[in-house]
Protein backbone atom coordinates (compact mmCIF):
# COMPACT_ATOMS: atom_id res chain seq x y z
CA UNK A 1 0.00 0.00 0.00
CA UNK A 2 1.40 3.38 -0.95
CA UNK A 3 0.62 6.64 0.75
CA UNK A 4 -0.53 9.53 -1.37
CA UNK A 5 2.19 12.02 -2.17
CA UNK A 6 2.00 15.26 -0.29
CA UNK A 7 1.67 18.07 -2.81
CA UNK A 8 4.57 20.52 -2.84
CA UNK A 9 3.60 23.97 -1.65
CA UNK A 10 3.35 26.59 -4.31
CA UNK A 11 6.32 28.89 -4.74
CA UNK A 12 5.58 32.61 -4.90
CA UNK A 13 5.57 34.71 -8.00
CA UNK A 14 8.43 37.17 -8.37
CA UNK A 15 6.08 40.00 -7.35
CA UNK A 16 4.92 38.14 -4.23
CA UNK A 17 8.53 37.42 -3.26
CA UNK A 18 9.51 41.06 -3.80
CA UNK A 19 6.50 42.29 -1.81
CA UNK A 20 7.22 39.94 1.09
CA UNK A 21 10.89 40.95 1.13
CA UNK A 22 9.96 44.65 1.13
CA UNK A 23 7.41 44.11 3.90
CA UNK A 24 9.86 42.25 6.17
CA UNK A 25 12.52 44.90 5.54
CA UNK A 26 10.06 47.67 6.38
CA UNK A 27 9.19 45.97 9.69
CA UNK A 28 12.91 45.68 10.55
CA UNK A 29 13.44 49.32 9.60
CA UNK A 30 10.48 50.31 11.77
CA UNK A 31 12.04 48.50 14.73
CA UNK A 32 15.12 50.71 14.48
CA UNK A 33 13.05 53.83 15.30
CA UNK A 34 13.60 53.71 19.07
CA UNK A 35 17.36 53.54 18.52
CA UNK A 36 17.54 56.96 16.90
CA UNK A 37 18.87 59.59 19.26
CA UNK A 38 17.91 63.23 18.86
CA UNK A 39 20.19 65.71 20.58
CA UNK A 40 18.68 67.27 23.71
CA UNK A 41 15.79 64.76 23.78
CA UNK A 42 15.87 62.17 26.56
CA UNK A 43 15.52 58.64 25.22
CA UNK A 44 13.55 55.92 26.94
CA UNK A 45 15.83 53.18 25.67
CA UNK A 46 19.31 52.67 27.12
CA UNK A 47 22.29 52.49 24.75
CA UNK A 48 22.81 48.78 25.40
CA UNK A 49 19.15 48.17 24.52
CA UNK A 50 19.47 50.28 21.37
CA UNK A 51 22.50 48.23 20.35
CA UNK A 52 20.51 44.99 20.73
CA UNK A 53 17.63 46.39 18.66
CA UNK A 54 20.02 47.55 15.92
CA UNK A 55 21.76 44.17 15.83
CA UNK A 56 18.44 42.31 15.64
CA UNK A 57 17.20 44.56 12.83
CA UNK A 58 20.45 44.05 10.90
CA UNK A 59 20.04 40.28 11.33
CA UNK A 60 16.50 40.46 9.95
CA UNK A 61 17.69 42.58 7.00
CA UNK A 62 20.52 40.12 6.27
CA UNK A 63 18.33 37.01 6.54
CA UNK A 64 15.60 38.55 4.42
CA UNK A 65 18.08 39.61 1.73
CA UNK A 66 19.78 36.20 1.65
CA UNK A 67 16.49 34.32 1.39
CA UNK A 68 15.18 36.74 -1.25
CA UNK A 69 18.26 36.42 -3.48
CA UNK A 70 18.44 32.65 -3.09
CA UNK A 71 14.79 32.07 -3.93
CA UNK A 72 14.84 34.62 -6.76
CA UNK A 73 17.38 32.42 -8.58
CA UNK A 74 15.38 29.25 -7.92
CA UNK A 75 12.30 30.78 -9.52
CA UNK A 76 14.06 30.54 -12.92
CA UNK A 77 14.23 26.76 -12.70
CA UNK A 78 11.56 24.83 -14.62
CA UNK A 79 11.35 22.29 -11.77
CA UNK A 80 12.69 23.86 -8.56
CA UNK A 81 14.45 21.47 -6.25
CA UNK A 82 13.42 20.96 -2.61
CA UNK A 83 15.86 23.70 -1.53
CA UNK A 84 13.63 26.30 -3.20
CA UNK A 85 10.69 25.17 -1.08
CA UNK A 86 12.82 25.21 2.06
CA UNK A 87 13.96 28.77 1.30
CA UNK A 88 10.36 29.83 0.71
CA UNK A 89 9.30 28.21 4.00
CA UNK A 90 12.09 30.11 5.79
CA UNK A 91 10.98 33.37 4.16
CA UNK A 92 7.42 32.78 5.33
CA UNK A 93 8.63 31.89 8.82
CA UNK A 94 10.54 35.16 8.99
CA UNK A 95 7.34 37.07 8.17
CA UNK A 96 4.94 35.02 10.31
CA UNK A 97 5.14 37.25 13.42
CA UNK A 98 3.58 40.02 11.31
CA UNK A 99 0.86 37.84 9.76
CA UNK A 100 -1.89 40.08 11.12
CA UNK A 101 -0.10 43.39 10.60
CA UNK A 102 -2.27 45.91 8.74
CA UNK A 103 0.58 46.80 6.35
CA UNK A 104 0.99 43.21 5.12
CA UNK A 105 -0.30 43.19 1.54
CA UNK A 106 -3.55 41.24 1.38
CA UNK A 107 -2.30 38.99 -1.42
CA UNK A 108 0.44 37.67 0.90
CA UNK A 109 -1.75 36.67 3.84
CA UNK A 110 -2.86 33.37 2.34
CA UNK A 111 0.74 32.48 1.47
CA UNK A 112 1.89 32.81 5.06
CA UNK A 113 -0.73 30.59 6.63
CA UNK A 114 -2.07 31.25 10.10
CA UNK A 115 -0.16 33.68 12.25
CA UNK A 116 1.16 32.96 15.72
CA UNK A 117 -1.52 31.83 18.13
CA UNK A 118 -2.38 34.22 20.93
CA UNK A 119 -2.51 32.59 24.35
Image (cartoon, rainbow, N blue to C red):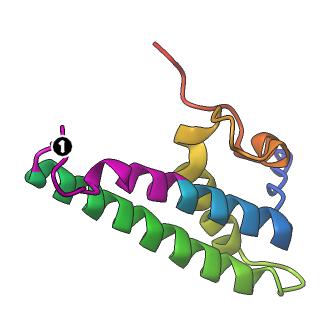
Which residue is located at x 36 percent, y 68 percent? 58
Range drawn in magenta: 27-46
Picture layout, residue 117 above or below residue 21: above
Percent of width and height locating residue 11: 80, 64
Percent of width and height locating residue 29: 46, 59
Other-residue count near label 1 (Cα within 10 Å), few / some / many at <14 / 14–19 / ≥20: few
For residue 37: magenta? yes
Residue located farthest toward the top when viewing the structure as drawn: 119
Quadrant where the N terminus is found in the figure: top right
Between residue 113 and residue 44, name the one nearer to us: 44
Percent of width and height locating residue 74: 74, 82
Q: Secondary structure at mark 1?
A: loop
Q: Quadrant of residue 91?
A: bottom right
Res 89 visible: no
Q: Quadrant of residue 90?
A: bottom right
Which residue is located at x 28 percent, y 61 percent? 54
Which residue is located at x 86 percent, y 80 percent? 79
Quadrant where the C terminus is found in the figure: top left
Picture layout, residue 85 above or below residue 98: below
Picture layout, residue 69 above or below residue 55: below
Q: Which residue is mark 1?
A: 43
Which residue is located at x 58 percent, y 50 percent? 95
Between residue 27 and residue 76, name the one nearer to us: 27
Percent of width and height locating residue 44: 18, 37
Between residue 82 and residue 105, name the one nearer to us: 105
Res 74 visible: yes
Q: How many marks?
A: 1
Residue located farthest toward the right when viewing the structure as drawn: 78
Amino acid sequence: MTTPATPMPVLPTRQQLKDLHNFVDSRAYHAIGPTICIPSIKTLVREDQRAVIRAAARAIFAASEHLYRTLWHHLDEPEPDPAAYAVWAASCALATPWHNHPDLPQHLRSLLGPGPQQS
